[in-house]
Amino acid sequence: MTPAVPVLFVHGIRTSGTMWRRQLSMLGEAGHPALAIDLPGHGARMDETFTVAGALAAIDEGVAALGGRVLLVGVSLGGYYAIEYAARHPQKVAGLVAAGSCALPAGWLLDAYRGLARLIRRLPDQGLWLHTTLVRVLLPSAGAADTLAGGVPLTVMDAGLGATGSLRPLDSLARYPGPVWLVNGSLDQFRLHERRFLAACQDGRLVIVPRASHLVSLAQPERFAAVLSGILTEVAIDWPGPIVDLSE
């Protein structure tokens, strides 16, 4: 008998909740309630302005929809906001998974990323062809399809990166008392500060997925699902909710 721990997924920048379709399917087959939200400026909320408050409110709505306490899983941009949410609402987060989110969103790295985004936005199509081409080249076909299914938000980069630059993920990790899994692809360019992120956690683990790139859940979906399955088993040990038999 294993508790059916609810899982809330938070997507990366310039994607949407559709990027989690493969993981949602696999969790559904295992009997776990799961939901993938759209952050402001993305997917069904593409017309909204991205802000820190708006992103955290979107996560809170998702947590409430799943019963008020979840395993919170974020990748890239979503990982930073999952960290911030867990620090502010630790009672609602039974465990935290931050994937591809181990580079400090500050200094030259953030400035370079924002500068590149502004240059790309000056292209005639605001970078649509470049973005979709890179997605299709860098990801497996199924992952690329899931990534693009929610549409491509062409104007969210500057607001999203600017808002994220106000976060302090190391401080937030230090405030969250629950278990944390930092999951990075071995080929992820955003692993720069993973040891500092791990050291900031009160109860942290670092998981490296072989031959996976930045969007690890899309690059290696089966391996990511296996990691997530192991995490759910650990979280279930202390889960206070009703017991559901997932072995049938």
Image: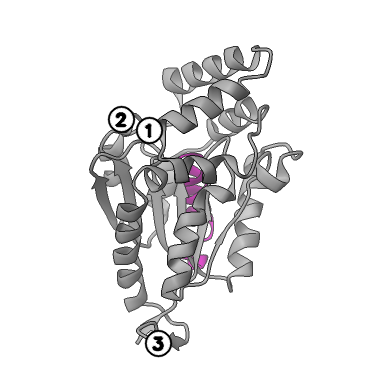
Look at label 3 and name its amino acid. Answer: Asp
In the visual, does 188 lie left or right of 71? left
Viewer-side label of 3, 1: 3
SS class of the residue under badge 2?
loop
Q: Height in image: 46 above or below 229?
A: above
Residue 230 can be seen in this image: yes
Q: Can you say which quadrant of the picture contains the C terminus?
A: bottom left
Q: Earlier in the sequence, mark 1 or mark 2?
A: 1
Q: Is residue 90 visible?
A: no
Between disc 2 and disc 3, the foreground one is 3
Identify residue for label 2: 192
Mark 3 touches mark 1? (CB < 8 Å): no
Q: Which residues are magenta?
A: 76-93
* Residue beneath the point at 47% across and 32% down: 136
Main SS of the magenta part reads: helix
Q: Is residue 167 left or right of residue 39?
A: left
- Contact between labelled residues 2 and 1, with CB atoms less than 8 Å apart: yes
Residue linked to disc 3 = 245
Q: CA distance from mark 2 to mark 3?
A: 41 Å
- Name, please, the residue furthest toward the right: 47
Residue indicated by mark 1:
103
Does residue 1 show up magenta in the picture? no
Residue type of the residue flagged with mark 2: Leu
Label 2 neighbour load within 10 Å: few <14, some 14-19, many 20+:
few
Residue 68 percent across, percent down from the top left:
57, 71
Q: Amino acid at mark 1?
A: Ala
Q: Within 10 Å of the Cα at label 3, are there few (<14), some (14-19), or many (20+) other Cα atoms?
A: few
Residue found 75% across the figure and 40% down from its top: 48
In the image shown, does 11 or 158 lie closer to the viewer?
Answer: 11
Q: Position of residue 160 (x, y in %)?
A: 60, 33
Task: Give the Cα distance between marks 3 and 1.
Answer: 39 Å
Q: Quadrant of residue 120?
A: top right
